[in-house]
Structures are given as C-alpha cells and as structure tokens.
Amino acid sequence: MSVAQAAANAEFPEKLACLFEPSRYKVLYGGRGGAKSWGIARALLILGAKSPLRILCAREFQTSIKDSVHKLLCDQIEALGLLGFYEITQATIRGKNGTEFAFAGLRNNISNIKSFEGVDICWCEEAQSVSRLSWNVLIPTIRKAGSSIWVSFNPELETDETYQRFVLKPPADCVVRKVNWSDNPWFPETLRLEKDALKERDIESYNTVWEGICRQTVDGAIFARE
C-alpha cells in the first residue's frame, strides 16, 4: 500500500483530529479504552511517512525497549500497510524518506536527553508519572522551529506534575482533549464487560480507570473516604 493510500484509509476517533493541526503541545488524557496511544502511533507514522521527521518517544521509566511504544508502533505499521516503507530494528524504526523514531526513558537518562538534537515531535506516553525535573529538562530540549510535544496519559492525582502542568494550568499554544472509552467508536466488547464489572464493584476505581477522573487519595491511604 502506498503512503497516500495508508493515510486516506486510516481512521481516528473524532477527538484525535487535533493531532493533524499545528500546536506546540497536544495533550490527550482520560481513562482506558479511548484509543489515545493507538491514535497517536497512527498519526506519527502517517506524518513520518509524508515528511522526514525525527520523533522521540519518551517516558519516565524505560529499562528496555520492551517498556517503550516500539511494539505499538510496529503493530500499527502492519495495520496501516506500511511495512514496505518503514524498516524496523530492535531499537529504532526508520522510514525510507529519513524519518527516524528513537526511544528513551527520562528518569535515569535525563542528562542524555539533552543531547537529542533536531527533534520534530516528542511523544511522552504514560506521562502521569513524568516528574517536574524531567519536564524541566525535556521541554527546552525540544526546541527546533515548529517542533511539538505530544502528551498522553491516564490521570491519577490532581497533584501530579503532568496534570498540573498540562490540564489545570496548560501553557500557551496547547490543545487539551479528554478522551474516554465513550469517544472510541471501536471500543471492544471485552473491555466493555470489564468496565461494567468494575463500575458495579467499585465506583471510585471505575471513575479513575475508565472515566479519567483523578483519585482523591493515594493507594493504601487510611480513611480514604474522609
């Protein structure tokens, strides 16, 4: 399949249209099943096939490539029919036009993050755990003209740095979308059964896991309801 055909045939939840519109920050947050990561992976692969891009896929903790979105991207390359365009290695993904995907953890690699030059798009996945220090180092590193930072996460606590920084007090030129299971037209029946079962068993956990509502207490805290 050609790049043009892959782009034309790719489908996305309506709320993810913002991924193809210009902005410095693109923030997708919410509960499980909203296709946030799936949609971002697709969008990045399509954009990278149209133009040569350097894309950094980061997360707070990555001890090996298995911890990264490498497998998700590989699955979407196959789903989009782009196996003839992207070359997949154990540590990188490269396009025939020069597009390159790199993968890095932030917490234990923060000094090396500063060496990433010329990044066009940085995708921070599972960003609810990204620390203030990591953001303070990463954001100035993504400084190429026209570069953007994409953030995806399932919120946990309102006090978490990422929630404070991008949802409660978002920066200028920032598009923020809450994306839940109800926004995903391809939400599978198996997950619907899980969702409904948790709703009956524990409404507070359901609200956090599936509706993207921040928990009011830390796990294990005493007197949670107080």
Image (cartoon, rainbow, N blue to C red):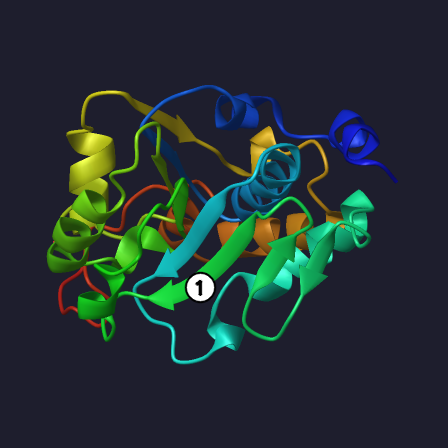
Residue visible at 29% across and 53% down in the picture? 128
Q: Is residue 34 left or right of residue 25?
A: right
Q: Nearer the viewer, residue 169 or 201?
A: 169
Can you say whether 167 is above or below 130 in the image?
Answer: above
Residue at numbered disc 1: 103
Can you say whether 104 is above or below 8 in the image?
Answer: below
Residue visible at 18% across and 58% down in the picture? 134
Q: Quadrant of residue 166?
A: top left
Q: Nearer the viewer, residue 219 or 172?
A: 172
Q: Is residue 131 left or right of residue 155?
A: left
Q: Quadrant of residue 31?
A: top left
Q: Is residue 42 left or right of residue 11?
A: left
Residue type indicated by callout 1: Phe
Q: Nearer the viewer, residue 54 or 29?
A: 54
Is residue 30 visible in this depiction of the protein? Answer: yes
Question: In x, y percent, where is residue 203?
Answer: 41, 49
Q: Tell me the SS state at disc 1.
A: strand
Q: Is the C terminus in the top left, top right, bottom left or bottom right quadrant?
A: bottom left
Question: In x, y percent, where is residue 162?
Answer: 22, 46
